[in-house]
Amino acid sequence: MNLQELKHLIDYAIDDCQLIIQRNPMSVLSEGDFEKILSNCISKRIGYVAINPIPTEFAVYSQISHYNNENDLLDARVDLLLMKPALIDSEAIIVNHNKRFVYKSKESFAIELKYRHDDKKNDVDAAKDDIEKYVKYKDDSYYYAIILMDKKDNTIKCEEDILDFYEEKKNEYGNDCINKFFCKVLYKEIEKE
Protein backbone atom coordinates (compact mmCIF):
# COMPACT_ATOMS: atom_id res chain seq x y z
CA MET A 1 0.00 0.00 0.00
CA ASN A 2 1.35 3.44 -0.87
CA LEU A 3 0.73 6.66 1.05
CA GLN A 4 -2.10 7.84 -1.23
CA GLU A 5 -3.92 4.53 -0.73
CA LEU A 6 -3.31 4.84 3.00
CA LYS A 7 -4.79 8.35 2.94
CA HIS A 8 -8.03 7.00 1.46
CA LEU A 9 -8.26 4.39 4.23
CA ILE A 10 -7.58 7.08 6.84
CA ASP A 11 -10.47 9.09 5.37
CA TYR A 12 -12.77 6.08 5.73
CA ALA A 13 -11.53 5.59 9.30
CA ILE A 14 -12.28 9.25 10.09
CA ASP A 15 -15.82 8.70 8.82
CA ASP A 16 -16.06 5.56 10.99
CA CYS A 17 -14.84 7.57 13.99
CA GLN A 18 -17.38 10.34 13.33
CA LEU A 19 -20.15 7.73 13.16
CA ILE A 20 -19.09 6.24 16.52
CA ILE A 21 -19.07 9.69 18.11
CA GLN A 22 -22.42 10.52 16.54
CA ARG A 23 -24.00 7.32 17.84
CA ASN A 24 -22.38 7.55 21.27
CA PRO A 25 -21.23 11.08 22.15
CA MET A 26 -20.16 9.89 25.60
CA SER A 27 -17.52 7.66 23.99
CA VAL A 28 -15.30 10.76 23.79
CA LEU A 29 -14.73 12.68 26.99
CA SER A 30 -11.13 13.67 26.28
CA GLU A 31 -8.62 14.03 23.49
CA GLY A 32 -7.17 10.70 24.63
CA ASP A 33 -10.53 9.03 23.98
CA PHE A 34 -10.62 10.61 20.52
CA GLU A 35 -7.11 9.31 19.83
CA LYS A 36 -8.03 5.80 20.97
CA ILE A 37 -11.19 5.60 18.86
CA LEU A 38 -9.53 6.97 15.73
CA SER A 39 -6.53 4.69 16.24
CA ASN A 40 -8.86 1.67 16.46
CA CYS A 41 -10.78 2.78 13.35
CA ILE A 42 -7.56 3.23 11.38
CA SER A 43 -6.19 -0.12 12.59
CA LYS A 44 -9.34 -1.89 11.39
CA ARG A 45 -9.28 -0.15 8.01
CA ILE A 46 -5.61 -0.94 7.30
CA GLY A 47 -5.68 -4.43 8.81
CA TYR A 48 -3.18 -3.64 11.56
CA VAL A 49 -3.25 -6.09 14.46
CA ALA A 50 -0.84 -5.14 17.25
CA ILE A 51 -0.41 -8.72 18.45
CA ASN A 52 0.74 -9.87 15.01
CA PRO A 53 2.02 -6.92 12.95
CA ILE A 54 3.29 -7.38 9.42
CA PRO A 55 6.68 -5.58 9.30
CA THR A 56 6.22 -4.44 5.69
CA GLU A 57 2.70 -3.04 6.23
CA PHE A 58 1.65 0.13 8.05
CA ALA A 59 1.27 0.00 11.82
CA VAL A 60 -0.37 2.56 14.12
CA TYR A 61 1.76 4.20 16.82
CA SER A 62 0.84 6.96 19.27
CA GLN A 63 2.63 9.83 21.00
CA ILE A 64 5.83 9.54 18.98
CA SER A 65 8.52 12.18 19.43
CA HIS A 66 9.62 14.11 16.37
CA TYR A 67 12.99 15.80 16.24
CA ASN A 68 14.07 18.65 14.00
CA ASN A 69 16.25 17.20 11.24
CA GLU A 70 18.62 20.16 11.35
CA ASN A 71 19.55 20.11 15.03
CA ASP A 72 17.99 16.91 16.42
CA LEU A 73 16.00 18.87 19.03
CA LEU A 74 12.52 17.72 20.01
CA ASP A 75 10.04 19.91 18.14
CA ALA A 76 6.78 17.95 18.38
CA ARG A 77 5.12 14.82 19.64
CA VAL A 78 2.76 13.44 17.02
CA ASP A 79 -0.51 11.99 18.30
CA LEU A 80 -0.70 9.14 15.77
CA LEU A 81 1.97 7.93 13.39
CA LEU A 82 1.47 5.33 10.71
CA MET A 83 4.63 3.71 9.43
CA LYS A 84 6.01 0.33 8.49
CA PRO A 85 7.89 -1.42 11.32
CA ALA A 86 10.45 -2.74 8.82
CA LEU A 87 11.45 0.84 8.01
CA ILE A 88 12.15 1.85 11.60
CA ASP A 89 15.76 2.87 11.83
CA SER A 90 17.09 1.05 14.88
CA GLU A 91 19.91 3.58 15.11
CA ALA A 92 17.30 6.32 15.47
CA ILE A 93 15.78 4.75 18.56
CA ILE A 94 16.81 6.67 21.62
CA VAL A 95 15.81 5.29 24.98
CA ASN A 96 16.29 7.48 28.01
CA HIS A 97 14.14 9.51 30.34
CA ASN A 98 13.90 12.51 27.97
CA LYS A 99 13.40 10.92 24.57
CA ARG A 100 11.23 8.27 23.06
CA PHE A 101 11.40 6.65 19.68
CA VAL A 102 12.63 8.93 16.89
CA TYR A 103 11.27 8.33 13.42
CA LYS A 104 13.08 9.26 10.25
CA SER A 105 11.09 7.34 7.64
CA LYS A 106 9.82 9.29 4.64
CA GLU A 107 7.10 6.67 4.20
CA SER A 108 4.94 7.66 7.15
CA PHE A 109 1.74 9.52 7.96
CA ALA A 110 1.62 11.87 10.97
CA ILE A 111 -1.79 12.72 12.44
CA GLU A 112 -2.36 15.49 14.97
CA LEU A 113 -5.65 15.45 16.86
CA LYS A 114 -7.37 18.25 18.70
CA TYR A 115 -10.56 18.00 20.76
CA ARG A 116 -12.05 21.36 21.59
CA HIS A 117 -15.04 21.76 23.89
CA ASP A 118 -15.95 25.37 23.21
CA ASP A 119 -16.67 27.43 20.14
CA LYS A 120 -14.42 30.31 20.95
CA LYS A 121 -11.34 31.92 19.42
CA ASN A 122 -9.01 29.80 21.59
CA ASP A 123 -10.39 26.65 19.99
CA VAL A 124 -9.78 28.03 16.52
CA ASP A 125 -6.27 29.13 17.52
CA ALA A 126 -5.47 25.67 18.93
CA ALA A 127 -6.65 24.06 15.67
CA LYS A 128 -4.56 26.53 13.66
CA ASP A 129 -1.51 25.63 15.75
CA ASP A 130 -1.99 21.97 14.79
CA ILE A 131 -2.43 22.87 11.12
CA GLU A 132 0.82 24.82 11.20
CA LYS A 133 2.67 21.77 12.55
CA TYR A 134 2.77 20.55 8.96
CA VAL A 135 6.06 22.43 8.56
CA LYS A 136 7.61 20.28 11.29
CA TYR A 137 6.62 17.00 9.66
CA LYS A 138 6.73 17.88 5.94
CA ASP A 139 10.19 16.45 5.33
CA ASP A 140 9.39 13.19 7.12
CA SER A 141 5.69 12.46 6.64
CA TYR A 142 2.37 13.09 5.05
CA TYR A 143 0.32 15.10 7.54
CA TYR A 144 -3.29 15.25 8.71
CA ALA A 145 -4.76 17.68 11.29
CA ILE A 146 -8.10 16.40 12.62
CA ILE A 147 -10.15 18.60 14.90
CA LEU A 148 -13.13 17.38 16.93
CA MET A 149 -15.44 20.09 18.24
CA ASP A 150 -18.44 19.99 20.54
CA LYS A 151 -21.34 21.21 18.42
CA LYS A 152 -22.52 24.57 19.73
CA ASP A 153 -24.06 27.73 18.33
CA ASN A 154 -20.82 29.08 16.83
CA THR A 155 -19.28 25.77 15.73
CA ILE A 156 -20.00 26.23 12.02
CA LYS A 157 -18.25 29.61 12.08
CA CYS A 158 -15.28 28.06 13.90
CA GLU A 159 -15.10 25.27 11.31
CA GLU A 160 -15.14 27.86 8.51
CA ASP A 161 -12.30 29.78 10.21
CA ILE A 162 -10.27 26.59 10.63
CA LEU A 163 -10.77 25.37 7.07
CA ASP A 164 -10.13 28.87 5.63
CA PHE A 165 -6.84 28.94 7.56
CA TYR A 166 -5.99 25.47 6.23
CA GLU A 167 -6.62 26.65 2.65
CA GLU A 168 -4.43 29.73 3.25
CA LYS A 169 -1.62 27.49 4.49
CA LYS A 170 -1.96 25.16 1.51
CA ASN A 171 -1.62 28.15 -0.79
CA GLU A 172 1.34 29.44 1.21
CA TYR A 173 3.15 26.10 1.14
CA GLY A 174 2.46 25.66 -2.57
CA ASN A 175 3.47 22.55 -4.47
CA ASP A 176 5.37 21.15 -1.45
CA CYS A 177 2.12 20.15 0.21
CA ILE A 178 0.09 18.86 -2.72
CA ASN A 179 -1.39 15.46 -1.84
CA LYS A 180 0.41 15.26 1.52
CA PHE A 181 -1.22 17.91 3.76
CA PHE A 182 -4.81 17.44 4.98
CA CYS A 183 -7.31 18.78 7.51
CA LYS A 184 -10.77 17.73 8.66
CA VAL A 185 -13.22 18.93 11.31
CA LEU A 186 -15.51 16.50 13.14
CA TYR A 187 -18.40 17.20 15.50
CA LYS A 188 -19.67 15.82 18.77
CA GLU A 189 -23.30 16.50 19.61
CA ILE A 190 -23.76 17.68 23.17
CA GLU A 191 -26.87 18.07 25.26
CA LYS A 192 -28.25 21.58 25.32
CA GLU A 193 -28.21 23.15 28.75
Image: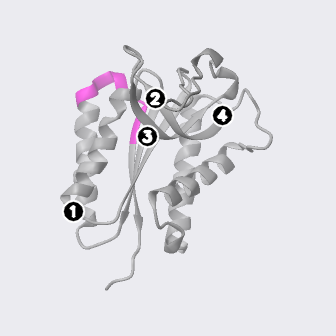
The image's mark for residue 120 is 1
For marks 3 and 2, the one nearer the N-term is 2
Nearer to us in this view, 30 or 47: 30
Task: Please determine whether, in this image, residue 113 is positioned above or below residue 24.
Answer: above
Distance from label 1 to label 3 (Cα)? Answer: 22 Å
In three-dimensional space, the C-alpha distance between marks 4 and 2, rounded to whole angstroms, equals 18 Å
Q: How is the image coloured?
A: one colour
**Residue annotated with mark 3:** 144
Q: Which residue is mark 4?
A: 58
> How far, Cα to Cα, is label 1 from label 2?
29 Å
Q: Which residue is mark 2?
A: 66
Q: Is residue 192 left or right of residue 98?
A: left
- Compared to residue 49, the image places residue 33 above or below, namely below
Label 4 or label 2, whichever lies nearer to me, is 2
Which residue appears at 43% of the width and 31% of the height? 179
Q: Nearer the viewer, mark 1 or mark 4?
A: 1
Q: Which of disc 3 and disc 4 is earlier in sequence? A: 4
At numbered mark 3, what does the secondary structure look like: helix, strand or loop? strand
Residue occupying the far front of the picture: 97
Q: What number of labels is visible? A: 4
Q: Which mark is residue 143?
A: none
Q: Quick one: label 4, few (<14), some, or many (20+) residues within 10 Å? A: many
Q: CA distance from mark 4 to mark 3?
A: 16 Å
Q: Which residues are magenta?
A: 172-182
Most foreground residue, 99 or 175 = 99
Q: Earlier in the sequence, mark 1 or mark 3?
A: 1
Secondary-structure class at tag 4: loop
Badge 1 vs badge 4, beta-carbon distance below 8 Å = no
